[in-house]
Image (spheres, helix red, strand yellow):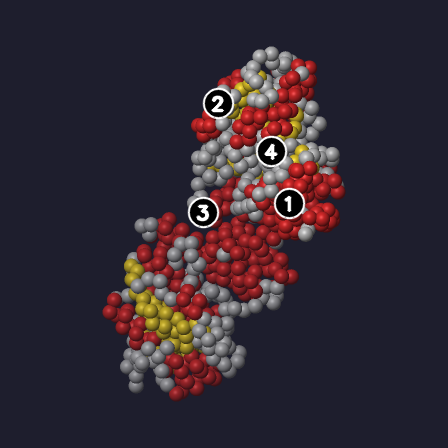
């Protein structure tokens, strides 16, 4: 006759014939003999029952409960807990073992510390008996002592994957019964059936204590862990974990109503629920064959909302996002008539990308659309919001939280189409586009710079954009050559659409008289942000330096806000150092009427940018009748057939200064340039932008907006990409206009210069070999031209 048990070992078993004997032997070998072993046979169909019966006849501490039908381990454990006579319970699966001292050590700690729960370490082994240190470490206790609400917070920490294995702890029996009482009596949970009880126990417990001893031996790969996904049936089994996590929602809400901190409890549960969704998603993607993944993901979306799946992946298993994006289904822009349009950027200001967005919002509202503008970061200029538009600054702290907020904005504001102005400047736009798709909202990407910008910046965004382009229903670029580039990259939905005119361009419509040639001092102007990387403000000093040898009396006014380490003070200091302070002066920013007056006081606009998408300053200057002198940007749509622009070779300040001097030497030539500028500005204003943007959001752009790339496009793009790559490689060759208009042919040079070029050619060959390989990877359609370029450089190979 054994004394009353002090620990009940509850074993839920099902078809464990091959392993149950070892499990039972580990129970009978406990150093604490005052135990009972309650085996709940969940309607096994093999010899499990016979093995248990043999042990029961051998030792009366073994008890048997047989279920008439298979009701899952969840119900089997319920039966065992209700039948337990000890004050404390250990759980053991039929394919694992307890270490001999498990009951004795854990009970001693529970009694000494008056703990509801005692956590301990787990030995994890594979099918060959080898210890799996990584998983074993993840199962180790993280806290020595937890009390009151800290028990739940410590065992189920927010933003960390939820772990609910019952076999990692000793429990106070009554606490388990209280937890089960919160759930339906007939609940059946085939997968992750321990987490619901573990979570509720943690919410009810008032004291947890742990020890580092490894008291449980877990066999990884047995049962449901590590199981492959050979078909939808296995996928259905794994997704049952989601139902298990969601089965306790009513109980959690009931506990929250009685809690002094209900929001904390609900947030904690939401984190645990999403972590299970994320785990299931990651598991399915890892274990399902590639061909099966679409069907598996389709089934997953019947078990959880698309938004929850994306947010769960971003929050807990970000590696899953790549596959989710790859398998995301397109949304046709023509699926319904759009009414609500969302425009988004990082922060809203008054210039740059924001100026385009604001003008675009005005045209869309004039076309009858509801416009919502969303800034993804704090710090916007609220005064810049156009009248009639709704403005939102996102407040989420991390990407997962922001994706939830993004989807909610789309729902709350009845958004039909998103235009994202950050796709060339951010790395998380694909996640936003994916989140929008979860609520059936398509995204249009709007590019604001030439396609070579990522290559010039060496930031890897080309690969990001190309890989994730299928998440965009349309990719809008600002020139036909840009559209050709993206199509050569495989982005078939690329199109060309002009940026809208700025308010200054529209307000200048009344200017119709060409300017008279200046008779006295020549006044040049430049405005924009003082940014060196793309706008090359330092080149203004070089231009002024060369121009003073050609035009004795001139001044160049530089207008714009400081940018990074380039300030008006620094530019003026450099001018003084080069004795140009009488010729060039930076005066800081000017806005509104002050800017208009500054422009009107000038005779010409100078642009020194090395890369742009659509510099509004060119059209704004031309709208006031100013001729434009600039370094070549041959892809610019605004520069095509624009006789008010005089271009010089990129980076050749002497060439640009010479062309300025030449134009002002002839009053007739200057006045012709001024008239041509007004014509070009009128062309930019005259487009029906409301209709164009309506075509964009309805998916009805004409074929003219999406031309197929030609061989000439490919050749010009190859030249441009090599040029920008050379900028980063340190090859600062002088270039001028090629006969084909690419703007990248080498200048005519003296014999000495040609000898120097021979050395440069050899260096170019060494650079070009890996460069050509990179470019062909970048644009596969350029392979024939890359081969041709390699042949042309062959003489320098030695």
Q: CA distance from mark 1 to mark 2?
A: 38 Å
Tag 4 or tag 2, which sits nearer the N-term?
Answer: 2
Point 58% across, 22% down: residue: 549
Frontmost residue, 710 versus 88:
710
Tag 1 or tag 3, which sits nearer the N-term?
Answer: 3
Q: CA distance from mark 2 to mark 4?
A: 22 Å
Q: Secondary structure at mark 3?
A: loop
Tag 2 or tag 1, which sits nearer the N-term?
Answer: 2
Question: Which residue lies under the disc numbered 3?
Answer: 398
Tag 2 or tag 3, which sits nearer the N-term?
Answer: 3
Tag 4 or tag 1, which sits nearer the N-term?
Answer: 4
Q: CA distance from mark 3 to mark 1?
A: 52 Å
Q: Are marks 1 and 4 in contact (CB under 8 Å)?
A: no
Mark 1: few/some/many CA within 10 Å (<14, 14-19, 20+): few
Where is residue 301 shown, x and y percent of the image? 57, 55
Q: CA distance from mark 3 to mark 2?
A: 48 Å
Q: Quadrant of residue 136?
A: bottom left
Give the residue at the far bottom of this rendering: 58
Residue 372 appears in the figure: no
Question: Which residue lies under the disc numbered 1?
Answer: 759
Question: Which residue lies under the disc numbered 2?
Answer: 581
Question: Which residue lies under the disc numbered 4?
Answer: 651
């Amino acid at each position: 006759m054994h004394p009353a048990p002090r620990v009940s070992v509850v074993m839920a078993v099902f078809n464990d014939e091959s392993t149950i004997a070892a499990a039972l032997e580990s129970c009978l070998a406990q150093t604490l003999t005052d135990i009972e072993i309650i085996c709940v046979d969940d309607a096994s169909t093999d010899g499990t029952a016979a093995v248990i019966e043999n042990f029961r006849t051998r030792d009366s501490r073994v008890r048997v409960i047989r279920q008439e039908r298979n009701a899952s381990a969840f119900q089997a454990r319920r039966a065992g807990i209700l039948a337990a006579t000890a004050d404390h319970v250990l759980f053991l699966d039929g394919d694992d073992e307890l270490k001999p001292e498990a009951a004795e050590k854990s009970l001693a700690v529970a009694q000494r510390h008056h703990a509801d729960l005692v956590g301990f370490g787990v030995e994890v082994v594979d099918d060959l008996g080898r210890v799996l240190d990584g998983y074993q470490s993840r199962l180790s206790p993280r806290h020595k002592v937890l009390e009151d609400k800290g028990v739940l917070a410590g065992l189920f920490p927010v933003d960390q994957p939820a772990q609910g294995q019952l076999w990692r702890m000793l429990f106070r029996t009554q606490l388990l019964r209280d937890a089960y009482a919160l759930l339906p009596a007939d609940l059946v949970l085939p997968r992750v059936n321990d987490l619901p009880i573990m979570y509720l126990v943690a919410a009810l417990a008032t004291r947890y204590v742990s020890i580092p001893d490894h008291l449980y031996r877990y066999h990884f790969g047995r049962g449901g862990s590590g199981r492959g996904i050979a078909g939808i049936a296995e996928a259905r089994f794994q997704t049952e974990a989601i139902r298990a996590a969601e089965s306790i929602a009513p109980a959690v809400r009931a506990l929250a109503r009685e809690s002094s901190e209900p929001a904390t409890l609900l947030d904690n549960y939401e984190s645990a629920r999403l972590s299970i969704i994320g785990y299931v998603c990651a598991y399915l993607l890892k274990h399902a064959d590639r061909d099966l993944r679409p069907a598996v993901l389709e089934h997953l979306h019947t078990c959880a909302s698309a938004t929850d799946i994306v947010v769960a992946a971003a929050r807990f298993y970000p590696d899953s996002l790549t596959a989710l994006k790859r398998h995301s289904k397109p949304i046709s822009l023509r699926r319904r008539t759009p009414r609500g349009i969302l425009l988004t950027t990082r922060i809203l200001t008054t210039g740059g990308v924001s100026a385009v967005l604001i003008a675009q919002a005005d045209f869309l509202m004039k076309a009858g659309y509801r416009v919502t503008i969303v800034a993804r970061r704090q710090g916007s200029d609220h005064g810049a919001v156009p009248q009639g538009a709704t403005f939102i600054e996102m407040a989420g702290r991390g990407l997962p939280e922001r994706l939830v907020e993004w989807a909610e904005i789309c729902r709350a504001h009845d958004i039909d189409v998103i235009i994202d102005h950050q796709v060339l400047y951010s790395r998380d736009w694909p996640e936003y586009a994916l989140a929008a798709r979860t609520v059936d909202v398509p995204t249009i990407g709007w590019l604001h710079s030439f396609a070579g910008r990522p290559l010039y910046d060496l930031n890897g965004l080309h690969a990001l954009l190309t890989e994730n382009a299928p998440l965009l229903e349309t990719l809008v670029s600002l020139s036909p050559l840009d559209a050709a580039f993206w199509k050569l990259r495989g982005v078939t939905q690329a199109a060309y659409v002009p940026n809208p005119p700025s308010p200054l361009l529209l307000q200048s419509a009344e200017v119709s008289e060409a300017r008279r040639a200046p008779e006295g001092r020549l006044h040049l102007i430049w405005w924009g942000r003082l940014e060196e990387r793309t706008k090359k403000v330092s080149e203004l000093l070089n231009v002024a330096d060369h121009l003073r040898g050609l035009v004795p009396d001139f001044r160049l006014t530089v207008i714009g806000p400081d940018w990074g380490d380039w300030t008006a003070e620094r530019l003026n200091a450099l001018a003084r150092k080069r004795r140009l302070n009488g010729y060039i002066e930076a005066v800081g920013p000017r806005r509104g009427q002050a800017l208009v007056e500054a422009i009107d006081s000038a005779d010409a606009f100078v642009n020194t940018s090395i890369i742009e998408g659509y510099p509004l300053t060119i059209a704004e200057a031309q709208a006031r009748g100013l001729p434009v002198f600039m370094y070549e940007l041959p892809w610019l749509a605004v520069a095509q057939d624009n006789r008010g622009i005089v271009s010089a070779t990129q980076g050749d300040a002497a060439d640009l200064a010479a062309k300025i001097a030449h134009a002002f030497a002839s009053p007739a030539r200057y006045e012709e340039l001024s008239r041509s500028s007004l014509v070009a500005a009128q062309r930019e204003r005259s487009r029906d932008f409301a209709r164009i943007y309506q075509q964009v959001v309805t998916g009805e752009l004409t074929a003219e907006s999406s031309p197929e790339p030609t061989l000439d496009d490919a050749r010009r793009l190859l030249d441009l990409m090599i040029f920008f790559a050379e900028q980063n490689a340190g090859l600062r060759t002088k270039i001028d206009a090629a006969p084909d208009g690419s703007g990248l042919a080498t200048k005519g040079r003296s014999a000495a210069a040609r000898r120097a070029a021979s050395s440069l050619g050899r260096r170019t060959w060494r650079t070009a070999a890996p460069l050509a390989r990179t470019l062909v990877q970048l644009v596969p359609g350029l392979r024939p031209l890359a081969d041709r370029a390699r042949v042309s450089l062959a003489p320098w190979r030695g």
